[in-house]
Image: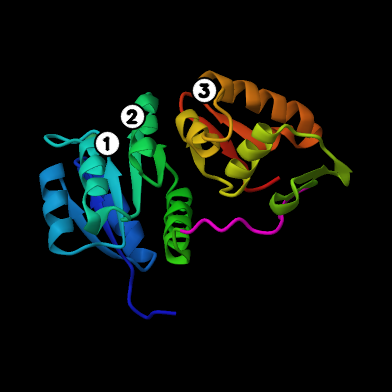
Amino acid sequence: MTEEKQSVLIVEDEEDILALLHFNLVKAGYQVDCAACGEEGLQKISEKLPDLVLLDLMLPGIDGLEICRRLRQQEATAQLPIIMLTARGEEQDVVQGLELGADDYVTKPFSVKVLLARIQTVLRRRAEGESVSTPEELVLGELRIHPGRNLVQVAGDNVELTYTEFRVLIALASRPGWVFTRYQIVNTVRGEDYAVTDRAVDVQIAGLRKKLGPCGHYIETVRGVGYRFRSEP
Ligand code: CA
């Protein structure tokens, strides 16, 4: 346990949202810094690396996606946790941002409670390290997955999955609550099955949902963005 406050840099040009975020993050115990445009954000990050960046996508000048790209290209900031703040209708940008390496996103208007939970999750994941160690068993409600044993059970009954379906399920279920773009899912299973394409991901998901029966809805569609495994049954 560290006594030091974790620091968050907010890059947001809308004053109202900036003020709301600043107030709530300080209240939640974070050390908060703000930037009103992309240039200022990059400048502040280069001066002092925060623990996490809340990044608005629509910014005057250098926009959020470009900031994301630049941060990921530099060694010092390649692993810097980034949560994008997006507006409704920006799904294409969300997809691009996630593929550029942003950790997560929240859509405005957002609930402060949800945002704080996302921040905690991202910070915890980063603290646990990047090595995504697959646990021995993943359990959600009636669904049990044993990655090492290639075994999936729904309410105690074995479910027969294809190898690719299994890989897709593990990828999603290993990070419950996280949105994956189709491209990211393809990347996860690539190398094992050449036939996997964006469109094929939808087919795999449809097959998975059907085979998982009463647990099929644990795989949620995130409209315009991709898929997410529920964190609650
Ligand atoms: Ca904006």
Q: Cβ–Cβ below 8 Å for labels 3 and 2? A: no
- Which stretch appears magenta? 131-141
Q: Is mark 1 within 8 Å of ligand 1?
A: yes
Out of 57 and 145, give the one closest to the viewer.
145
Residue type indicated by callout 1: Leu
Residue type indicated by callout 2: Asp
Q: Tell me the SS state at disc 2.
A: helix
Which residue sits at x=39%, y=31%? 95
- Asked whether residue 80 is in view, the answer is yes
| CA distance separating discs 2 and 1 | 8 Å
Q: Cβ–Cβ below 8 Å for labels 2 and 1? A: yes
Q: Earlier in the sequence, mark 1 or mark 3?
A: 1
- Residue 169 position by quadrant: top right
**Residue pointed to by mark 3:** 197
Considering the whole magenta stretch, tell me its main secondary structure.
Answer: loop
Q: Is mark 2 within 8 Å of ligand 1?
A: no
Q: Earlier in the sequence, mark 3 or mark 2?
A: 2
Q: Quadrant of the N terminus?
A: bottom left
Residue 92 part of the magenta segment: no
| Disc assigned to residue 93 | 2
Which residue sits at x=88%, y=47%? 156
- Residue 33 position by quadrant: bottom left
Residue 216 x %, y %? 73, 33
